[in-house]
């Protein structure tokens, strides 16, 4: 099968899987087998596309004209390829984890949960492979609509309120800001296609470019740039596998992916650097990065703390996009990958703790590391990757962002990155210390501490994603090399830049 056909298959597989899941809903074992088989088939298909891309192919489908100047179509470039690999690969782990979590908590409406999950993954692949702004916008909105039932899954008052905030903020920002930005782009550029180097050079002055960029940044609500972030903590009423979907696999990653895609293929980093149109965004992203970390420090609920951590970590991606240098863009792309594996590990651990002990507040997790040693060790690994310490994958994204900041003449951003890492330490490692070094309540009364891990279907995926945090430290070169082919500048210039600036170590 050709790589072009594999794009279509990658879109059809999770869509068809959603239908089969609905049909097999009366048989939980068969339903969940369909889910896992579909996720494996999707990952194999995406890897087939990756093989073609690494061989030099540029897979694309024949565009369909919707109306004059607006087409529906798909094409694969390096950033979208990486996003598709991350989303499809982590869907496998999340599907296995969901079995243990949903059954362990005896969650209602499990069939609709798996159906909506599959549709959300299909939408994510559509976002990753979109050839133009129109196609991306269409799948971006499908992603919002398909994940709303997941956020409101528990159907209690809190879930419904959180779901309303989620839907209203994401649809509101899209319709009020993102859609006008896309229309404006189409009018001035005459195309909505993603083109290396951008499509706006010579079309707008620096002030207008800055305004258009603001419409995109705050219109892409899934990127959760402050103050358009409140939907993310509000959505933590969802089951933990949904939180993992929101934070690691699909939703927020679709947001920051879209920001990067727009910066590189609509504006172009050369245009932004020459006009200074993204200078304001450097400060907004730095503020969001630090402020969200400070808020995370105040949250006692584990999922709420991780939610604000995500707001901060997403700001790294936006910061790299705003710096508009090759190294910073590579750092942003690396952050999408590294944060995905680290944060899904942390959410898996939070869910496993809830399943095994029914504890959700950090203050109640005294000695939890002695009762759940495997889970807490995985939490430690995920935390160290988020912090950015070697030998964990998160090291490299911060390294490249630091290089990009210096290249852009914003050396102060390096200090921001360092302070942020210290704040990461402050809100993550005390959880580990509390879990390992303080005795659990039963130990104080002389009772033996029993090991009570969550079901294997929960523990195995979190071990796999924790291991990935380490693997990615050593496999980062392959990710960097693919990101370097994004068409930011001429290939020879990229090669020279990497040869000059690629680090030998963290």
Image (cartoon, rainbow, N blue to C red):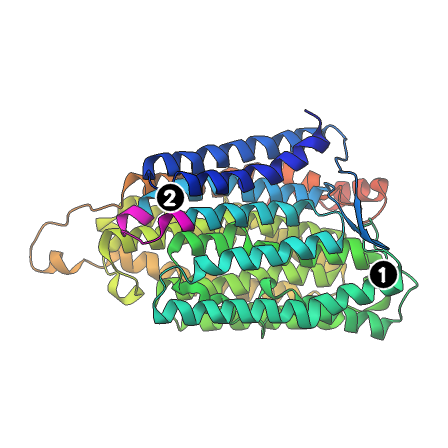
User: Position of 275 compared to 120: left or right?
Assistant: right
Residue sitting at the far left: 446
Circle number at residue 307: none
User: Position of 23 compared to 316: left or right?
Assistant: left
Tell me where residue 220 appears, x and y as whole percent.
65, 64
Label 1 SS: helix
User: Position of 362 compared to 75: left or right?
Assistant: left
Judge whether residue 105 is colored magenta.
yes
Q: Label 2: which residue?
A: 97
Instruction: Identify the residue at horizontal 65%, vertical 50% (top origin).
Output: 127
The stretch of residues the image draws in magenta is 102-112
* Res. 290 image quadrant: bottom right
For the N terminus, the quadrant is top right
Q: Label 1: which residue?
A: 271
Instruction: Identify the residue at horizontal 48%, vertical 52% (top origin).
Output: 245
Label 2 packing within 10 angstroms: few (<14), some (14-19), many (20+): many
* Res. 474 image quadrant: top right
Label 2 SS: helix
Label 1 packing within 10 angstroms: few (<14), some (14-19), many (20+): many
Judge whether residue 470 is colored magenta.
no
Disc 1 from disc 2: Cα separation? 44 Å
Residue sitting at the far top: 1
Tell me where residue 244 appears, x and y as whole percent.
45, 53
Tell me where residue 391 appears, x and y as whole percent.
50, 43
Tell me where residue 60 appears, x and y as whole percent.
76, 38
Q: Nearer the viewer, residue 384 or 341?
A: 341
- With respect to residue 436, does 57 lie above or below? above
Q: Can you see residue 470?
A: no
């Amino acid at each position: 099968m050709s790589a072009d056909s594999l794009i279509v298959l990658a879109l059809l597989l999770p869509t068809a899987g959603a239908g089969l899941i609905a049909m097999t809903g009366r048989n939980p074992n068969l339903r969940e087998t369909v889910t896992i088989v579909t996720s494996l088939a999707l990952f194999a298909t995406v890897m087939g596309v990756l093989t073609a891309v690494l061989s030099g192919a540029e897979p694309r489908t024949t565009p369909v004209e919707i109306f004059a100047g607006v087409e529906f179509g798909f094409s694969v470039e390096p950033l979208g390829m990486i996003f598709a690999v991350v989303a499809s690969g982590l869907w496998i782990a999340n599907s296995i984890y969901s079995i243990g979590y949903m059954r362990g908590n005896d969650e209602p409406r499990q069939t609709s949960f798996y159906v909506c999950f599959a549709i959300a993954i299909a939408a994510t692949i559509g976002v990753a492979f979109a050839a133009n702004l129109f196609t991306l916008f269409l799948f971006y909105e499908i992603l919002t609509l398909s994940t709303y039932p997941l956020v409101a899954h528990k159907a209690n008052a809190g879930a419904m309120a959180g779901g309303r905030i989620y839907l209203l903020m994401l649809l509101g920002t899209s319709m009020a800001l993102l859609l006008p930005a896309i229309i404006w782009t189409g009018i001035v550029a005459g195309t909505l296609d993603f083109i290396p180097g951008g499509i706006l050079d010579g079309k707008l002055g620096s002030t207008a470019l800055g305004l258009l960029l603001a419409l995109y940044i705050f219109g892409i609500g899934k990127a959760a740039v402050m103050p358009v972030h409140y939907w993310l903590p509000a959505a933590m009423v969802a089951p933990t596998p949904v939180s993992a979907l929101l934070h690691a696999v699909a939703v927020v990653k679709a947001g920051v992916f879209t920001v990067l895609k727009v910066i590189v293929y609509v504006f172009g980093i050369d245009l932004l650097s020459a006009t200074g149109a993204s200078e304001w965004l450097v400060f907004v992203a730095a503020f969001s990065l630090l402020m969200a970390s400070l808020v995370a420090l105040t949250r006692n609920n584990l999922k709420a703390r991780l939610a604000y951590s995500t707001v901060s970590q997403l700001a790294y991606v936006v910061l790299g996009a705003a710096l508009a240098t090759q190294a910073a863009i590579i750092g942003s792309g690396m952050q999408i990958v590294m944060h995905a594996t680290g944060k899904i590990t942390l959410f898996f651990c939070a869910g496993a703790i809830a399943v095994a002990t029914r504890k959700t507040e950090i203050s109640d997790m005294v000695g939890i590391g002695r009762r759940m040693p495997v889970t807490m060790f995985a939490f430690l690994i995920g935390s160290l990757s988020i912090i950015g310490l070697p030998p964990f994958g998160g090291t490299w994204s911060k390294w490249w962002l630091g290089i990009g900041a210096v290249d852009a003449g914003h050396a102060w951003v390096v200090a921001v990155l360092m302070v942020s890492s210290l704040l990461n330490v402050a809100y993550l490692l005390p959880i580990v210390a509390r879990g390992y070094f303080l005795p659990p309540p039963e130990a104080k009364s002389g009772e033996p501490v029993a090991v009570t891990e969550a079901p294997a279907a929960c523990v195995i995926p979190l071990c796999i994603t924790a291991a990935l945090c380490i693997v990615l430290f050593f496999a980062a070169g392959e990710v960097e090399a693919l990101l370097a082919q994004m068409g930011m500048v001429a290939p020879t210039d990229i090669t020279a830049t990497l040869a000059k600036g690629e680090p030998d170590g963290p």
